[in-house]
Amino acid sequence: MPNLRGIVGFFSKSGLECLLEIKNNFLNFIGSFGCEGLMIAFASYPIVLLCRDAAGISGNIFALGLFVSPIPTFRRIIRNCSTEQFSGLPYIYALLNCLICVWYGTPFISANNILVLTVNSIGGVFQLVYITIFIIYTEKEQKVRMFSLLLAVLGIYAIIVVGSLQFADFLTRHVIVGTLSVVSLISMFASPLFIINLVIRTKSVEFMPFYLSLSTFLMSSCFFLYGIFNNDEFVYVPNGIGTVLGIAQLVLYFCYKHSTGEGSTEPLIVPYA
């Protein structure tokens, strides 16, 4: 026979008081955090850090596919020793975007954003190489213009770096540079929006390559998750918009893919995290 007296004793007044005390202490502990505190506590768990790093590394890999997408264009430029009708402005603007995001990813501006720093550092090197090739093979007037724009981009970047360091408060620097990076990233969505509008008007995916759209979606969604896991709105907000636009591009592709032949291989400007 079970010891009924022992079982009853467990649920005695003193036993219930102990349980109630444990419950109240737990609720007080949770309540002391608040919503923001809970997000910080949640983000400190090892599994969340693992998911964050996995998303960031995946985003770096998918971004590499976007960075190499202009290579066929520049092989053609080198082969023909001419930039023909190609414009170098997209690469100038992409370089500025990468530089701003590189600065945001440094420990001087934000914590635990090393993977934002790496992806944009790689992207910046690619853009600089493309701009150099463009300057070499373009006409004399365009050489001067492109070189002047390159110096302007480097000057703007220097102003942002030096200017942000004038603020002693870390949070102020974080908000200012983070806002600039968000504005830069969102403005980069002008190209995908233009392409989406072009596809709807022409009912053709000629200028919207499938693999480029897929890479854009995968990279944006990875850095959207990276920003969520890292509790960084300056990362997940722009990349959340990029994810939505990436889905829209893929939906349009499958709607109109039978209306045209092979998709164009011309590179499009896409946002980097």
Image (tube, rainbow, N blue to C red):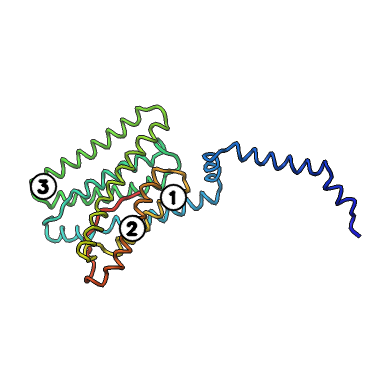
Q: CA distance from mark 3 to mark 1?
A: 39 Å
Residue in the foreground of this view, choosing between 172 and 110: 172
* Amino acid type indicated by mark 3: Gln
Coordinates of residue 12 in the picture (x, y in percent): 84, 45
Q: Are marks 1 and 2 in contact (CB under 8 Å)?
A: no
| Quadrant of residue 205 within the rendered picture | bottom left
The residue wearing badge 2 is: 246
C-alpha separation, residue under disc 2 versus residue under disc 3: 33 Å
Left or right of 189? Residue 49 is right
Q: Quadrant of residue 199?
A: bottom left
Residue picked out by circle 1: 226
Would you say 117 lies left or right of 197 here?
Answer: right
Q: Quadrant of the N terminus?
A: bottom right
Viewer-side label of 2, 3? 2
Whether residues under marks 2 and 3 lie with C-beta atoms below 8 angstroms apart, the answer is no
The residue under label 3 is 142
**Label 2 crowding class (10 Å Cα cut-off): few <14, some 14-19, many 20+?**
many
Identified by mark 1, the residue type is Tyr
Tell me the amino acid under the disc marked 2: Gly
Question: Residue 197: horizontal and vertical position, in percent?
Answer: 23, 57
The quarter holding residue 167 reads top left
Q: Secondary structure at mark 3?
A: helix
Position of residue 44 relative to residue 160, above or below, is below
Q: Is residue 200 above or below residue 106?
A: below
Residue drawn 34% across and 27% down? 166
Whether residue 29 sits left or right of residue 78 in the image: it is right
- Mark 1 and mark 2 lie on one chain; the one further toward the N terminus is 1
Residue 74 point in image, percent of width and height: 19, 57
